[in-house]
Image: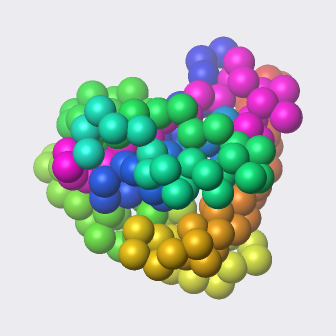
Amino acid sequence: MAKMRLLFVCLGNICRSPAAEGIMIEMVRRAGLSEQIECDSAGTSGYHEGEPADARMRSHAKERGYHLPSLSRPVRAPEDFQNFDLILTMDKSNYQNVLRLDSTGAFHHKVVPMTKYCRIHNISDVPDPYYDGDDGFRLVLDILEDACGELLDRLKVDLNRTKS
């Protein structure tokens, strides 16, 4: 069976998307599904290409037991559209920007707002914590834990369907 491949996307790929990637990697590991689910992250801009996640986000994530391993990179079209099963965007702007990168519209069905998976938080965007201080980073982690938990539950159902 092929791996389910997830790409998490925000603007600069230094706060929200690497946090989502790190949270999901850990949840997948705990569920024993690392062989079936692969995670990566990217940004709609290349401003921070090659840089690790923001030090504040890494610190807050570490407090919760998450490691943020990725280095920032921009979304690569058309490769990312072809290589990933789901492209999860952090806000409306990221969503629109990713859809624009898929000029033919052939992969629009793969692009999904991350907040679609929130069970606890009733919001439409994962806010950018860059200028919001510690509370902003903690809120983003709360939202992403919520969304990643539900996403993983849904992926488990899909994986079980493909087994039978």
Q: Residue 137: x, y in percent?
A: 57, 68
In the picture, measured across the screen, residue 116 lies left or right of residue 46, that is: right
Which of the 4 quarters of the picture holds residue 73? top left
Q: Residue 120: x, y in percent?
A: 76, 77
Q: Residue at x 54, y 32 (%)?
A: 69
The residue nearer to you, when weighing 111 against 109, is 111
Which of the 4 quarters of the picture holds residue 156? top right
Residue 97 is one of the magenta-drawn residues? no
Q: Residue 115: x, y in percent?
A: 57, 69
Residue 109 to residue 1: above or below: below
Q: Residue at x 41, y 38 (%)?
A: 52
Residue 142 to residue 30: above or below: below
The residue nearer to you, when weighing 54 against 116, is 54
Which of the 4 quarters of the picture holds residue 121? bottom right
Q: Residue at x 85, y 34 (%)?
A: 31
Single out the residue that lies furthest toward the bottom. Answer: 122
In the picture, measured across the screen, residue 135 lies left or right of residue 18, that is: right
The residue nearer to you, when weighing 158 against 153, is 153
Report the label total. Answer: 0
Residue 97 to residue 51: above or below: below
Residue 125 visible from this viewpoint: no
The residue nearer to you, when weighing 120 against 16, is 16
Q: Residue at x 74, y 52 (%)?
A: 63
Q: Residue 42: x, y in percent?
A: 36, 43
Single out the residue that lies furthest toward the left. Answer: 103
Q: Which residues are magenta?
A: 26-47
Quadrant where the C terminus sits is: top right
In the picture, measured across the screen, residue 113 lies left or right of residue 24, that is: left
Residue 58 visible from this viewpoint: yes
Residue 45 is one of the magenta-drawn residues? yes
